[in-house]
Amino acid sequence: MSLKKTLLAATVLSLPLAAQAQPVTGIYVGAGAGANWRNAVNQNGFNIRSENPGWVGVGSVGYGFGNGFRVEVEGNYRHNSIRRSTFTGGFVGSSGSLRTYGGMVNALYDFSLASFGLPNISPYLGAGVGYGQSQYNRVTLRNGAIGLSSIGSGNGNFAYQGIAGIAFGLGDIVPGLALTTEYRYYGTLDTSQRFAVTAPGVATSARSGKLNNGNHDLLLGLRYNFGVAPAVIPAVVPVAQAPVGGVARTYLVFFDWNRADLTPRAREIIGEAAQNSRTASVTRLEVSGHADRSGTPAYNQRLSQRRAEAVAADLVSKGVSRSAINIQAFGESRPLVATADGVREPQNRRVEIVLR
């Protein structure tokens, strides 16, 4: 009988869904907007309270390394109205606004919840540093005659932020797209502010002081990872032997990224292989472990070994003699789907069971 290309249809079901929120790989863009609560200023004779919440907008361009880590550059803008302001001399203000804007460099890490049954959800944590500008605009005092406004544009300083968020994968709708929700604390070192004070019949005077700047943000946004391909059904695999007597000779067991534990569906596939090894003329079972290229070759070699050993152990628990099992580990050297180095490919995270 001529060699055939077969793949047991049931093995396809053991492949983790491509719609899962896989860690970001390569270039991505993101944007978000939301509410901003600004801490009150109470320094150097100035007391300025904002109308809360104001609003915040951010935009970013970044790069994901495929292992959970990513870096990005970000531009941001925050706007709050002034509710009340006083400064030495007893003047009280009731209008105006505060604008804060600048640029940041952020480092973030995405966590996978696939092992908890939440493959489309990825919490993440991050921190950033950069430079921020603050400017007070048209602060008019209660009597409507005295005004206070920033002088010049040199009101910036070192900025820092902490980020905690959750990404919800929308790969079923658009590959690479995710909805994000975040909390951020954004602050700068005390900024040197110079104000022009104007009043009827009085020459314009200047006041200055160092003012604090702290912000709490809640944002909703979108992130798009370029180059993410749609879900792919595993290709037909050429096998060494054709089915004999209706018994398949090759079985594929797939794994989640960076994991060697068996899913319930994987155990079902192994059970089918164990049962058929007893009904067919089988003298040995070849168990070959494989990995994708998202790690180093040395690490992937060890990971493929652990996967093969996990499958072999489950075969033994289902009645297959250990002496009949031949374990091999090929690391990333024999992919089903050719990829560039560092790419996560679900079809390459597998163990092949061949009945001989």
Image (cartoon, rainbow, N blue to C red):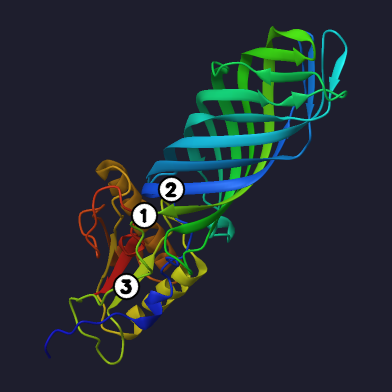
Element type where label 2 sits in the image:
strand
The residue at which mark 2 appears reads as 29
Q: Amino acid at mark 3?
A: Pro
Name the residue: 73% across, 19% down: 148
Residue 49 x/y as whole percent: 80, 26
Residue 275 in sight from this viewpoint: no
The residue at which mark 1 appears reads as 226
Element type where label 1 sits in the image:
loop
Q: Amino acid at mark 2?
A: Val
* Quadrant of the rendered image containing residue 41: top right
Q: Specify which label sits upstream in the sequence, 3 or 2.
A: 2
* Quadrant of the rendered image containing residue 287: bottom left
Name the residue: 58% across, 61% down: 117
Q: Specify which label sits upstream in the sequence, 1 or 3.
A: 1
Element type where label 3 sits in the image:
loop
Name the residue: 57% across, 51% down: 221
Distance from Cα at disc 3 to Cα at disc 2: 29 Å
The residue at which mark 3 appears reads as 234
* Marks 2 & 1, CB-CB < 8 Å contact: yes
Residue 232 x/y as whole percent: 34, 71
Residue 130 x/y as whole percent: 49, 25
